[in-house]
Amino acid sequence: MNVISRTATAVVAALALSVPTAAITTTSAAGAAAGVRSAEAEAFATPRAAKPRIKLKRSKAYSHYGQEGVKVTATVTKGRKKARGKVTFSLNGTAVSTARLKRGQASYRLASTNAPGLYTVTATYRGKKRSVQVRVYDSALNLSAATFTISKTTPQYQMPDGPSGTVRFKDQVATTGYVDIYENGNVKGGSSSPDYCCMAKVEADGSFVFQTFLDNVWADKQPGTYTYQAFYTDGPEFADYIYSTPITVTVVP
């Protein structure tokens, strides 16, 4: 009887131990298989497309009415790659230009005829938008005359004054600064430019008069037609300036 009891007990114990082991083994195998399938799915999953990013850069923060407008450049990327396609530029909410991306960049320049004021330039690429503001100042260099004819037979001391004019700069009458005249508008180098002619001081009411301009042309030029341009700057460093319409001087014998 004791032998049978001990044998039965041993069988029961063996069965009890064998069941958890099988269950654990099955669970572990299933988990491992699931892990393999998950890794395989990740390996073969289609990578997400990088979202486009737009950066805007202005050639400068503002321009002057009637002068060259500000250029806004959009740089579009997708991840580390330069984007392709087209960018639409809008001015105060109205589409004004569509430009194709070249090496990830497209540009738009505001027109010189835009009225003074604050403008919002928006670049749109496939639903993505970025905006920047540009100001246009009410500025003008007005001349009393832009066409002159002088004769070499007239004595130099009898040359008339001219031109005269007024200056408005950044939404107000200019009260300081200088107006310089350069042949062919070659302002590079300021007063050190080889084409620099002469200078007039701007008075408190914004007016100026060139008293030696035609004297200098008479002395320096032979008969012919020459083109000049006046430039106003509010400081000697010539950091910012506006310019006039071309001035034409005809020298006759």
Image (cartoon, rainbow, N blue to C red):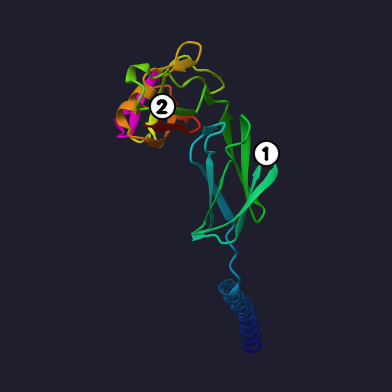
Left or right of 84, for residue 222: left
**Identity, as a three-letter code, of the amino acid under mark 2:** Ile
The answer to whether residue 152 shows anywhere in this view is yes
Residue 241 in which image quadrant: top left
Is disc 2 surrounded by few (<14), some (14 to 19) or many (20+) residues within 10 Å?
Answer: some
Circle 1: element type: loop
Which percent across, then down, holds residue 135?
Answer: 57, 32
According to the picture, the residue beneath numbered tag 2 turns out to be 150
Is residue 199 inside the magenta stretch? yes
> Which of label 1 and label 2 is nearer to you?
2
Q: Can residue 236 be seen in this view?
A: no
Q: Where residue 232 sits in the image (x, y, percent)? A: 44, 25
Vertical relation: 39 (above or below) 207: below
Residue 128: horizontal and vertical position, in percent?
64, 51
Decide which of 28, 40 is in the foreground and name it: 40
* Residue under pointer 1: 92
- Furthest-right residue in this view: 94
Q: Which amino acid does label 1 sit on?
A: Asn
The residue under the point 56% across, 62% down is 84
Mark earlier in primary sequence (1, 2): 1
Q: Where is residue 185 in the image (x, y as percent from the top left)?
A: 41, 35
Q: How much space separates mark 1 and mark 2, taking CA atoms?
A: 49 Å
Query: Viewed as shown, does residue 236 lie left or right of 48?
Result: left
Q: Does the magenta stretch include residue 208?
A: no
Q: In which quarter of the image is residue 161?
A: top left
Q: What element carries label 2?
A: strand
Write the start and end of the magenta stretch as one range.
191-200
Circle 1 packing at 10 Å, graded few (<14), some (14-19), many (20+), is some
Of 37 and 195, nearer the camera is 195
> If the image is split into quadrants, where does the C terminus sit?
top left
